[in-house]
Image (cartoon, coloured by chain):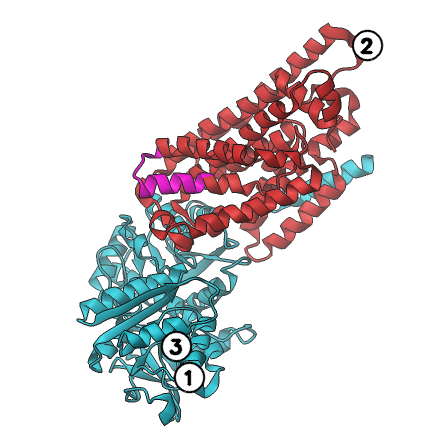
Amino acid sequence: MLKQLRNAALAAAAALAFTAPGADAADDKIRIGMTVSSAGNFALASQSGVRGVEIWVDEVNKAGGLEVGGRKLPVELVKLDDRSDKQMTARVYETLITDEKVDLLFAPFGSTLTAAAATATERLDKFLVIWSAAADTLYDQGFKNIVSATQMPVSRMPVASLDLAKELGTKKVAIVYVDEPFPAGLATGAEAAAKERGLEVVLMERYPKGAKDFSLILQKARASGADVFFPTSYEGDLISMVRQMRQMNINFPYTFMVYASTPQFQAIGEDGDYIYSHTNFHPTINWEVNAGLNREQFVEAYDRLFPKAEYPADFQTVLAYGAGAIAGEIIEKAGSTDAAVLKQAALDLSGELTVLAGPYKIDETGKQLAMPFPVVQLQPEKGMVTVWPSEVAVAEPIFPIPAWTDR
Amino acid sequence: MASSLGGVAAPAEGRSGDARVGRIRISLWIVVALGVVLPLLAAPALTENLSFSFYLMLWIILCTSFNLVAGFTGYMPFGYVAFYGVGAYATGVLHKTYGLPMPGALVCAALAGAAVSLLLAPTLRLKGVYFGIVSLALAVIFRLVVSMLPEDITGGSMGLILARANDPQTTYYVTVAVLAACLAAAGWLAFSRTGVALRAVRDDADAAAIVGIDVTRTRLKAWVLAATFPAVVGGLEAWYTNAIDPEASFNILVTAKVIVYSMAGGLGTLLGPVLGAGALYGIDHLIWQKFPVLNLMFLGIIIMVMILVFPRGLVGSFAQRFPLLRRYIP
């Protein structure tokens, strides 16, 4: 028993030895707080994003830091683990602000965690840079100190593809979606965007999760007379739809599939040809950047800093890196880390910056209005190429999509 | 595991001895409860970091109410998070979708928790691990039901954002009040005749029935009480973080943590869950702040060591080491 007590005392002592860090605010650097999910559902996406921010921090510090009030200040990234847990997120952000004394913060991955983080940053009056929260509702809560530097809300995601559809002279849109929040959000956004552009929505069809047979839906879409087919489901459903379209010889002049840009979708081979999709990170997407690294420099930095990373850079890394580059410009413009001053600087810079992820434009609520995902097309000879908008297009769109019988 | 704890005094001492021991135990519990509540009440004046104390209260409330069913009646509800999630959603939906003020929404959350516990009361007929499995399945079902409700009511899998109600200070003080109520209710249940009856039912339901205890009613009291507090806490957490979604609100980790914390402290005593929640949550906080990447691994090791060293929980092992003091432990 005594031995047990001694063991217990040792365990307790070991636990107590991990004393809390008493970080002091240092005036000679800018401390930026951020969460990283070591485990849980958001771990991969969160870590992808953190790598993007780390590339930005490395780039800034190599250049001697950010210029604030006539002095060059290096940037320090302070990370705490949220375990993809909303409860932890609230603690992470309060601890970063009150104990770690960070000057401003980067948001976690996803809308729920970002809302929890924003609650803390608003109460303690700190600036929060968002890179991955797509829920539209986040921006009408009256949060004063948030800015979505790179992530556009769900409702705006279909905008670029429908701009192209309009440009190509289409008239009628058939929207099909699985009954899940993200696809449903995209579908609602597409419906609104189509109407705004004077396109007629001839079909708005929801189907339950788990459906495998899309023949009825496809026939409905054909019967509706649509020239734009716009399903917003995930890869698996889209692949089934394409195969069934081929079997049933169903053709649309313009078919846009959100996930057709993923390697998983493209594994279906030539059946996927001519389909339109969108992405923000691809060798053929090269914006004229005026803040931060361009795509080549970014890829080089990623390979140099993370030679052992499990995954290559993805769109999360690009969004987070872009948010870093924009935050840097905002801090230099503000010359301060006061939340209200930073927010004003963020508004002043709206429409002025273009980063790796695209042009930056926000409204008063901090909602991102630009950063379009360029439209790509799977062209048989060239592979996936960017066809819209004109700033980044490298190929002409093939329109209308050739019928199955003509291929 | 804890069936011998908090039992009646040795027969030789007689009735007056029993009463004296009872009074000491009640006094000790009052001291403990005040010792927990008062510092937490003062915490906002000392630090701006409310979250640490807020979630400490959350775990103490969850563990204490979990103990009412797991420790006092011997049922192990592996789906305990269902009450928490139902409370979070009742609060979120009533406030956001139907515009009910927060206090009203929280009261409704408590009622929702109680209603769900009554709905699930028939599962109390199951025993041991069968009850646990059914309870786990029910938690998954509740989560699915919530995600399948119309999106304009629950917000679907994206959940709801309630930031317009954002008022962490008020949320904090309301939580202190709920904590005090929870500790008081647990004390009442443990020291009242119902408490004695509960322990009798737990140890031998047939014998208890023979001496005239209404077994079903007694269990039901503990069950409803144990469901009401997590529902309120779910609502409070929704209010504090201003965001709910099915993933976070029905997270199985909530149940897992409640079980680990309570068992680390010692089920079956009032003190155990409070001590377990405080100790493990505190240790978790320290290593989490110190090791951003490896904290979960260290936490796992510490929990394993703790269970190996104190298989009956902190309080249970103490009672085993000092058997004479056992009956004074609240």
For disc 1, the marked residue is A246
Q: Which mark is residue A7?
A: none
Label 2 and label 1: CA atoms lie apart by 89 Å
Type of amino acid at the residue the image marks with label 1: Arg
Q: Position of residue A351 (x, y in %)?
A: 21, 68
Residue drawn at point x = 63 percent, y = 25 percent? B216
Magenta span dominant secondary structure: helix
Residue drawn at point x = 54 percent, y = 37 percent? B59
For disc 3, the marked residue is A281
For disc 2, the marked residue is B12
Near-viewer residue (A278 or A205): A205
> How dense is the environment of label 3, judged by Cα within 10 Å: few (below 14), some, or many (20 and up)?
many
- Region rendered in magenta: B87-103
Q: Position of residue A164 (x, y in %)?
A: 25, 78
- The red one among the chains is B
Label 1 and label 3: CA atoms lie apart by 29 Å
Q: Is residue A275 left or right of residue A369?
A: right
Image quadrant occupied by the C terminus of chain A: bottom left
